[in-house]
Image: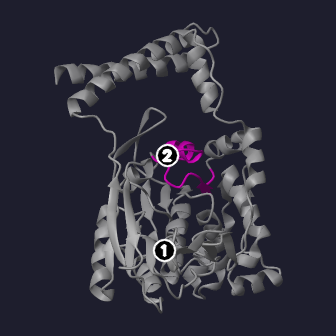
Amino acid sequence: MENQWKNKKRKRKGEEEILPLYTAEEAARSLEVFEPVQYDEIIEITEDIHVRFNDAGHMLGSSIIELWTKEDGKETKTVFTGDLGNNDLPLLDSPTMIDNADYLVMESTYGSRFHLRNDEKAQLFLDIVSETLDNEGTVVIPSFAVGRTQEILYELNKLKEEKDDEEFKRKYRTLMKSAVYVDSPLAISATEVFKENTNLFEREIQEEIMKGDNPLEFPGLKFTQTADESKALNDDPTPCIIISASGMCDVGRIKHHLKHNLWNPKSTILFVGYQAPGTLGYNIVNGAKKVKIFGEEIAVNARIEYIEGYSGHADQEGLMNFIYSFIQKPKHIFLVHGEAEAQDTLKEKIETETQISVTIPEYGETYEINGIENNVEMTNKIERKVAKTLRAEIINRLEKLKEEIKDMDSYVRQDIDDKNLKDQDIFRINEKIKDLEKQIINVIEG
């Protein structure tokens, strides 16, 4: 699709079309070179290199990797955690604890934070959702297609067993009377994959499924496959719950649901996963009063909530428990996959409590491990290629802007020459150009 969009631009400029990086058929065929492996199976790569995948508990199939390498007659074991799961994830098993390692490469996403416990987040979830529905609003949940969506479905199914008081029952009835839409083709497919791999669920949940209670199914649950079905959700004023990807709100159908609900004080946007700096989700969670969606400025009037306990990543306690579980402690730990504040906090915690030395690698750094002396040394660093000065960056941006304005000129002229264009569309185009004109004048006058 990206390639089709680029070729439209090239065609208008009289340039030759370019081939896509790969086709959908090639993407499907690439699966032929994948080889599935089981957890807890030692795989020989060569005589001197062996690996084993262990359940990381982050999402279905996620893995901690143990790597054994032999060199000069000495064997060294390195463990890569990948994304470590949150122990409170109800569907999946907890991360596998590893007995020993010479070196550990570990994620640090929540190295400075603690999650809510399961019972707290379930009650909080019910309170937020029922209050919004009572207020005749819609609950929009930006959710990652794999993992968080399925966990929320499980939570909705299990809430009825949590408490026995009348107020709880009233809130639960309110929730159950409402339609719950999963509006993401990928999330729908991923939910089917979950259903096909229930052997990886916690034992307690496997027993429930054997009794006929599938935690991913309940009355009122609806899946929207097509784009037209998705659009229809925003035309229906009936209060409901919409779970849609992407989790950080930068792409996908979620942007349409935000556009139609962010301005509405009756609605709630409920975040249940990590929001990376620079994303639309991050801006909303951190108090933005207005955001731009599809080029249109939208006021943030809706109730904004964030239940951190739904994160698929281990918090500081979970990360430290993983380190404590080693019988033979690592000689050195590398912290990756985390923001600076989280990494610095976790580094200090590890070094203080375990006396294990910690390195936070930077972009492009290469480290060499001396197996005999057990020391770690940075041997190379690739420098990022960045503009030498901010002045150079401004000139580059101006040149790019010139090209974009040329493209806009071409698109707008084609649109206004279209005899089928409605008056409201012409008005909208005119308003956007007026807005752009004001911004250019502000730059000139400033």
Q: Amino acid at mark 2?
A: Asp
Does 249 appear in magenta?
yes
Mark 1 vs mark 2: give the one in front.
2
Instruction: Look at 43% across and 47% down and name the residue there.
Output: 280
Reading the image, the residue beneath label 2 is 250
Residue 63 position in % (x across, y down): 60, 71
Instruction: Look at 70% across and 87% down and name the residue there.
Output: 204
Q: Is residue 220 visible?
A: no
Looking at the image, is mark 1 or mark 2 earlier in the sequence? 1
Q: Where are the magenta residues, as a range?
A: 238-262
- Report the side of 381 relative to 92 (left or right): left
Q: Mark 1 touching mark 2, by CB under 8 A?
A: no
Q: Label 2 crowding class (10 Å Cα cut-off): few <14, some 14-19, many 20+?
A: some
Residue 43 position in % (x across, y down): 68, 73
Secondary-structure class at tag 2: loop
Secondary-structure class at tag 1: helix
Q: Label 1 crowding class (10 Å Cα cut-off): few <14, some 14-19, many 20+?
A: some
Number of labelled discs? Answer: 2
Does 67 appear in magenta?
no
Reading the image, the residue beneath label 1 is 124
Instruction: Look at 38% across and 75% down and name the residue there.
Output: 333
Estimate the spatial distance between the alpha carbons at disc 1 and disc 2, rounded to whole Å: 26 Å
Instruction: Look at 42% across and 23% down and name the residue there.
Output: 432
Compared to residue 420, the image places residue 128 above or below, namely below
Residue 413 position in % (x across, y down): 51, 9
Nearest to the observer: residue 24 or residue 409:
24
Quadrant of the image containing the C terminus: top left
